[in-house]
């Protein structure tokens, strides 16, 4: 499975905002954006005028990096969003939010989306009582996500839940922290997705 293996803090600095790629470090003063709020590289401090295409590309790159998705899969999600009723850009973000690894992260069952992907791959979570080890699995309203019975005794899972369990949970997720379960009450509205990206720019880019 292809994945980005470079320094993830450089991605946040390149996009000029926190993408929450390093777990709890992103919530502390050790965050790279807090320490160096400019793009990486020797010309990072310079002011650069971007073209219309460049602005659209940055919007797409920011969304891809935020959710940890590579280009081919991101394009598939766009095509899926385009076929659905409603605004394509909002549909796209809704699809990305419904990925199992993202939901696990949103619930505080993992410190970052990258860690959530790894833990899902290792079979630590179930959907409607069945083990699902596919990070890109798309959940839907009514699905119940849970830490598997076998994994509840894992020191790794215990540490993650203790560290991240108090993180605010989106309103479209009904979490039971004691039982380590959650129900997808519905998919999120645009104003409930905290990604600061003008999604219409992504639609414009792919519509060229």
Image (cartoon, rainbow, N blue to C red):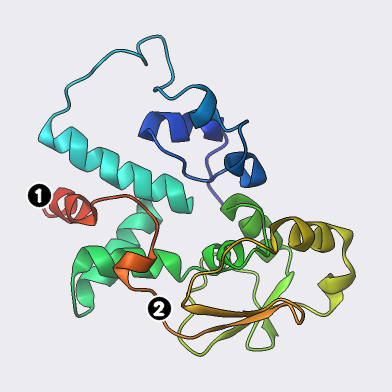
Can the viewer see residue 155?
yes
Residue at (39, 49) in percent of width and height: 64
Q: Is residue 1 left or right of residue 88?
A: right
Tag 1 and tag 2, C-beta contact below 8 Å:
no
Q: Is residue 138 above or below residue 41?
A: below
Give the number of the mark in front: 1 or 2.
2
Can the viewer see residue 79?
no
- Label 1: which residue? 208
Q: Is residue 10 left or right of residue 83?
A: right
Quarter location, residue 97: bottom left
Residue at (13, 52) in percent of width and height: 204
Residues packed near mark 2 inside 10 Å, few (<14), some (14 to 19) or many (20 plus): some
Residue farthest toward the top in the current orientation of the protein: 42
- Label 2: which residue? 187
Q: Position of residue 16 (x, y in %)?
A: 38, 33
Q: Position of residue 51 (x, y in %)?
A: 13, 30
Residues packed near mark 1 inside 10 Å, few (<14), some (14 to 19) or many (20 plus): few
Q: Position of residue 20 (x, y in %)?
A: 53, 46
- The numbered mark, 1 or 2, whose residue comes first in the sequence reads 2
Residue at (32, 66) in percent of width and height: 191
Depth check, front residue: 3 or 10: 10
Q: Is residue 35 left or right of residue 123?
A: left
Quarter location, residue 133: bottom right
The secondary structure type at the circle numbered 2 is loop
The secondary structure type at the circle numbered 1 is loop
Q: Gap in Å between the C-alphas at discs 1 and 2?
A: 29 Å
Residue at (46, 35) in percent of width and height: 12
Q: Is residue 208 left or right of residue 13?
A: left
Quarter location, residue 129: bottom right
């Amino acid at each position: 499975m292809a994945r980005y293996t470079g320094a993830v803090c450089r991605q946040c600095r390149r996009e000029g905002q926190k993408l929450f790629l390093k777990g709890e470090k992103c919530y502390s003063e050790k965050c790279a954006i807090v320490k160096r709020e400019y793009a990486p590289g020797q010309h990072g401090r310079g002011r650069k005028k971007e073209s219309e295409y460049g602005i659209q590309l940055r919007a797409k790159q920011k969304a891809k990096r935020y959710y940890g998705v590579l280009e081919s899969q991101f394009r598939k999600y766009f095509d899926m969003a385009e076929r659905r009723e409603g605004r394509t850009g909002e549909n796209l973000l809704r699809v990305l939010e419904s990925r199992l690894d993202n939901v696990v992260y949103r619930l505080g069952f993992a410190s970052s989306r990258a860690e959530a992907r790894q833990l899902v791959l290792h079979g630590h979570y179930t959907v409607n009582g069945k083990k699902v080890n596919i990070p890109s699995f798309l959940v839907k309203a009514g699905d119940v996500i849970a830490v598997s019975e076998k994994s509840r005794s894992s020191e790794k899972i215990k540490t993650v839940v203790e560290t991240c369990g108090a993180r605010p949970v989106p309103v479209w997720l009904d979490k039971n922290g004691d039982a380590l379960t959650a129900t997808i009450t519905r998919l999120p509205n645009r104003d409930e997705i905290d990604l600061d990206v003008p999604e219409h720019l992504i639609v414009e880019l792919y519509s060229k």
